[in-house]
Image (spheres, helix red, strand yellow):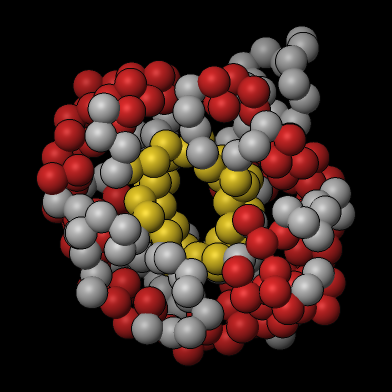
Amino acid sequence: MRKPLIVANWKMNHTVKEGLKFATRIQKDLPSEGQVEVVLCPPFTSLYSLSVALSEKPTVKLGAQNCHWEEKGAFTGEIGAAFLKELNCEYVIVGHSERRQLFHETDKEVCKKIAAVFANEMTPIFCIGETEDQRDKGKTAEVIERQLGEGLKEVFASSAPALVIAYEPVWAIGTGKNATPEQAQEVHEAIRRWFVRHFTASAAGQMRILYGGSVKPDNTAVLMKKPDIDGVLVGGASLEVDSFARIVNYT
């Protein structure tokens, strides 16, 4: 049984003070321990403070929004995976569509980042998804398979079960649009079939696939009823405690 995974991606929101206040409140609103796994991915500036705060009652885990693929070096403004590991990060978001679009990240770079995250004993949340134009042209499957193939070139079969894939249709991120549960399930099922072909049926059965893209309290439960949707990657709706608590308590 795959434990549901609920991930908050705060993007460039919440100061350290705001993040600490959020973390304190959300821990009071969690369902019974063990029912779901909850991860907060704050800005880099909040990672240390939240790491300390969450260590006192580790019902919420810590994740980062990005990392560099090199361990260290002359990369002004970047953060190596080892730095994140030192702060007790357990997850790292890799290949988010905003990174791909705004900062021109390539599949090759995403691949190297995934390898760096695994090398530092953390779990990558590997984001994939098609644009509206690609969907309209019937290229969703082609885009998804290319991103999976290129991004996972350096992943060993033994690591595949630990992967988290986040399917984020780019046309649904921050737009208010949302893939229907049926559309999301169709792509999630295709992703799992891809893993059966390229890794193993066991790996495909163990790995978790999240849906991201205008996730809200009122659509989480219906998404989570689909057999291949194992959780959600939440953007805007994760910025308010009450909203995110409703998502976490979707049952």
Q: Quadrant of residue 79?
A: top right
Q: Residue placed at 56% from the left, 61% from the top?
A: 166
Residue 194 pos. (x, y %): 76, 77
Is residue 21 something one can see in this rendering? yes
Left or right placement of residue 86 versus residue 205 in this view: left
Given residues 46 and 13, the one toward you in this image is 46
- The C terminus sits in image quarter: bottom left
34 to 176, vertically: above or below: above
Left or right placement of residue 3 versus residue 238 in this view: right
Is residue 167 something one can see in this rendering? no
Q: How many marks?
A: 0
Left or right placement of residue 57 versus residue 209 in this view: left
86 to 26, vertically: above or below: above
Q: Residue placed at 59% from the left, 20% from the top?
A: 83
Left or right placement of residue 19 versus residue 104 in this view: left
Residue 204 pos. (x, y %): 68, 73
Q: Residue placed at 38% from the left, 77% from the top?
A: 224
Given residues 88 and 228, the one toward you in this image is 88
Q: Quadrant of residue 249?
A: bottom left
11 to 150, vertically: above or below: above
Residue 120 pos. (x, y %): 67, 32
Residue at the far top: name it. 74
Residue 89 pos. (x, y %): 49, 33
190 to 165, vertically: above or below: below
Q: Residue placed at 19% from the left, 43% from the top?
A: 27
